[in-house]
Structures are given as C-alpha cells and as structure tokens.
Image (tube, coloured by chain):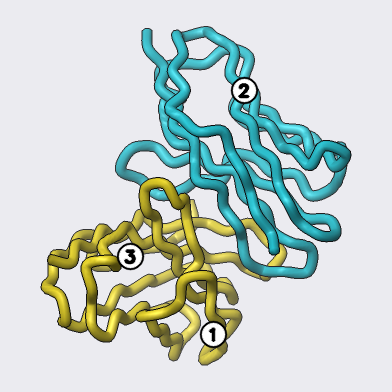
Amino acid sequence: GNSVTQMEGPVTLSEEAFLTINCTYTATGYPSLFWYVQYPGEGLQLLLKATKADDKGSNKGFEATYRKETTSFHLEKGSVQVSDSAVYFCALRGSGYSTLTFGKGTMLLVSP
Amino acid sequence: DAGITQSPRHKVTETGTPVTLRCHQTENHRYMYWYRQDPGHGLRLIHYSYGVKDTDKGEVSDGYSVSRSKTEDFLLTLESATSSQTSVYFCAISERGEDTQYFGPGTRLTVL
C-alpha cells in the first residue's frame, strides 16, 4: 500500500536559517504529492503540491521537487521566519485514488 | 478560504455514550472526508463520501459510522465512544477526487 515517511521533529532553527524537511514515499504508479501546514490550534492548509515527476511546487518561499528516481519530495526554504513555526505534513494521493495518505508530521520551531 | 465548519469544536463525553460530529460546507463539493489526528500518527482517514448517500471506509473505520443525506453535511457518529477515540477530528472537502482537499478547523473530542 501507499506510505509516507517524514523526518521526525521537532526541527529547531534560528530565524533566517535554511530549512529542509525530508519526505519519502512508497506508491505504485504516479502519485500526486503534497505539503500541508498546520499552525497551532488550526486545521491543515495546503502549502504546495506537485502532480508529476520533476514538477516543483512552490509557495510563500517554500519549495519541493517531485523526484521519482529517489521517491522523495523534500520541503525547503531558504530563510525561515518565526511565523513559519508549525507542523508540516507530507502527503500523497495514489494515481486514480481520491484519498490522501499522510506522513506523521514534522514540527518546526523557529526562534528569533 | 473554503467554507467548511465543524461542530462542536470541543466536546467532552463519557465512555459508552453516542457522539455525533458534524461537518458543513458551503462549496457544493462532491467529496467529503473525516480524519483523526493523533500524536505520532499524523492524520488517518476514517471514512469518506463521494456523493449523497455514497460513502466508503478509510484506514481506521472501526467504531465509526457516517451519513450524508445532503451535499453540504457529512456526519461522523461514534455509536459508543471509547477512550481510544479521544482525538482531534478533521473534516476535509474536495470538488473532485483528484482535486486538492481543504480542511476544516477541527473538533477536539475527549472521551473520559
């Protein structure tokens, strides 16, 4: 079946540091890949997505590239801010499916 | 923001009592989903609906039932709540199965 593995947190960074959160997946066919963000006390918001190999999703300074050869979709940001502190979820939707499979989430804590 | 509301937002109940959570949308989206979020597990799909009266099970459906009698409402029922069902429950919607899912604000349920 489909699965998503994310690096465990928390990830603790200082403001303006470079961020990488690793995400790898297992799926047959050509899944779509997503990053969602959850701010404290809120629901999940879509951060970015990619629907085919080599696509790069980007939003709010965050980027992730769909790498089929390494089955990865790592999230990166060049300079994090305190306001980026949240939990980040990697997810996939299998080809032909309508449901999402989520990773366990990675908490990011950014200090001034 | 997608028009999704969940009610109640917080509920404390006792073991063995029935509980119904409601998800209401104003987007006229066809698909609706119920997830639960637990530490160390990320989000896991409970049930989903692909149209009025059309539902299917997810990964963790035991102990839960759902109903969808109109497009805008998707109800999640715990027939006899157990402490293991203490969790945060999120509803999500999407226009089609292959579209992005948008999440509601969540319901925090505590079963004593």
Distance from disc 3 to disc 1, alpha carbons, whole Å, reads 19 Å
Q: Secondary structure at mark 3?
A: strand
Which image quarter: residue A50?
A: top right
Q: Please say if B65 is above or below A84.
A: below
Left of A48 or right of it: where is B74? left
Tell me where residue A45 appears, x and y as whole percent. 50, 45
Residue B33 rendering spot, x and y as whole percentages: 50, 70
Q: Nearer the viewer, mark 3 or mark 1?
A: 1
Residue B10 numbered mark, or none: none
- Mark 2 lies on a secondary structure that is strand
The amino acid at mark 3 is Gln
> Mark 2 — residue?
A20
User: Label 3 belongs to which residue?
Assistant: B6
Q: Residues within 10 Å of mark 3 (few under 14, many from 20)?
A: many
- Between marks 1 and 2, how big is the CA–CA gap? 38 Å
Q: Nearer the viewer, residue B50 or B111?
A: B111
Circles 3 and 1, Cβ within 8 Å, touching? The answer is no
Which residue is rendered at x = 74% and y = 61% of the image? A94
Marks 3/1 same chain: yes
Check the residue under mark 3 and report the chain it is in.
Answer: B
Q: Which residue is at 45% across, 52% downward?
A: B41
Q: Residue at x 62, y 49 (%)?
A: A91
Closest to the observer: A12 or B55? A12
Helix or strand or loop: what does disc 1 sit on? strand
Query: Label 1 belongs to which residue?
Result: B55
Instruction: Depth check: give the residue in front, A30 or B41.
Output: B41
Q: Chain of mark 2?
A: A
